[in-house]
Image (tube, rainbow, N blue to C red):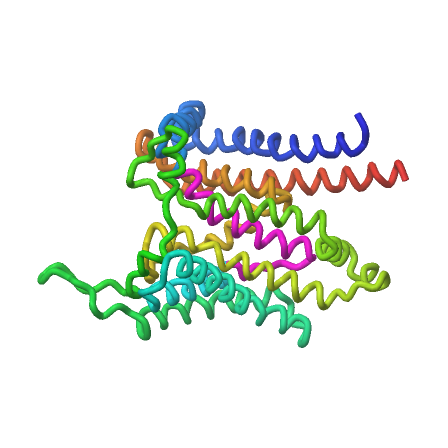
Amino acid sequence: MNKKTKILWLQILTPLAAVLFAMIVSSFLMLAIDKNPLEVYATMVEFSFSRMDSMAAILFNATPLIFSGLSVAVGFRLGLFNIGVEGQYFMGAFCAALVGFSFTNLPMFIHLPLAIVAAMAGGMLWSAIAIYLKLKRGVHEVISTIMLNYIAYSLIHYLVADVFMDQNQNIPEGLGSPLIRTAKIAESALMPKLHGLMGLFGVELPSYVYVNWFFLLAIALAVGIYYLIQRTPFGFEIRAVGQNPGAAEASGIKPAGVYLRGFLLSGAIAGLVGLSHLLCFYGFMDLDFPKSLGFNGIAVALMGNNNPLGIVLSALLFGFLSRGAEGIQTFLGVPMESVVIMQGIIILSVVVAANILGRYIRIWEKKEA
């Protein structure tokens, strides 16, 4: 076995070993709350994979995490920590909603792509603030993006509740107050579900399943990012600047320009994170729009070792954990908090294992040099 193949196998087996270790550790947690670990894991697997709607739910849960993981990973490959994916996807989702309910007479082949482009533009423009502050004023991107996340939350709250709230909701008399949400997005801007495509393969999905074409778009984007990073001159510049900006500059690469373009790309991808929920599940934006998808993307990217394929697998694992959690909550009475702790243990295990593996590979390469 040559060196490259051995490293590849180590990179594949290390996360698997870390997940197995995390399951063993989590077993003690299950025992502490008087649950049989084997029964818990068996229920999670059976509930998630014995039903077609559960498998579709895993894909739906994984879709935004693939986008957020890719966005974070692009920043990591640059040597930057884009912790602002959370705020960027909120801004992107609002821009898509604005386009979705503002235009009502556009054909779908124009309206839907326009909403997607608006989301990417919203995420990219919000990320531009952080990278501008870093390049022109030396503000660390972690500080600026954390603050921008809070600003985005508050700004979206104001826009939804005070500026663009739908005042024409049909609420039956005596049945409460109007929802704090935007107007409904036009049908022409909504993303179709995958039911038709799956039907061609003889798979019938229930109508309450919301897996949609954004999942396939996320897979295609993962392939595209892999190609960009590994096979293009810009990808080479990203890797060079991310590993050693000083050496990259000495070789003729301008790190500032690479930082700018790479961070804007990360923001544009972040703008896509909320679209699966917005344009297929909700159909409007409200104050209960899903949060923390951007933060979860950090864990997904770390688990996937910033590799697009690893990110897809990592997102699917998170999707499985979320779906499996519903099963063990329903059938075994396991509290949701236990599942969150289990996810944390898995993330910690994988991150520590990846760190140990990285050190091992560096030491090994030095010995052979």
| Place of residue 71 in the rendered image (x, y in percent of width and height, measured from the top left) | 57, 54
**154 shown above or below 49:** below
Residue 304 seen anywhere in this rendered image of the structure:
yes
Give the quadrant of the C terminus.
top right
Q: Is residue 52 left or right of residue 266?
A: left
- Extreme residue in the right direction: 369
Please identify the dominant SS of the magenta region.
helix
**155 shown above or below 233:** below
Residue 324 seen anywhere in this rendered image of the structure:
no
Front one among 10 and 67: 67
**351 shown above or below 328:** below
| Place of residue 24 in the rendered image (x, y in percent of width and height, measured from the top left) | 53, 28
Residue 79 inside the magenta-drawn segment: yes
Front one among 145 and 221: 221
| Place of residue 26 in the rendered image (x, y in percent of width and height, measured from the top left) | 49, 33
**192 shown above or below 180:** above
Residue 343 inside the magenta-drawn segment: no
Give the quadrant of the N terminus.
top right
Front one among 278 and 176: 278
- The magenta region covers 57-85
The residue drawn where x is 36% and y is 51% is: 280
| Place of residue 341 in the rendered image (x, y in percent of width and height, measured from the top left) | 47, 41
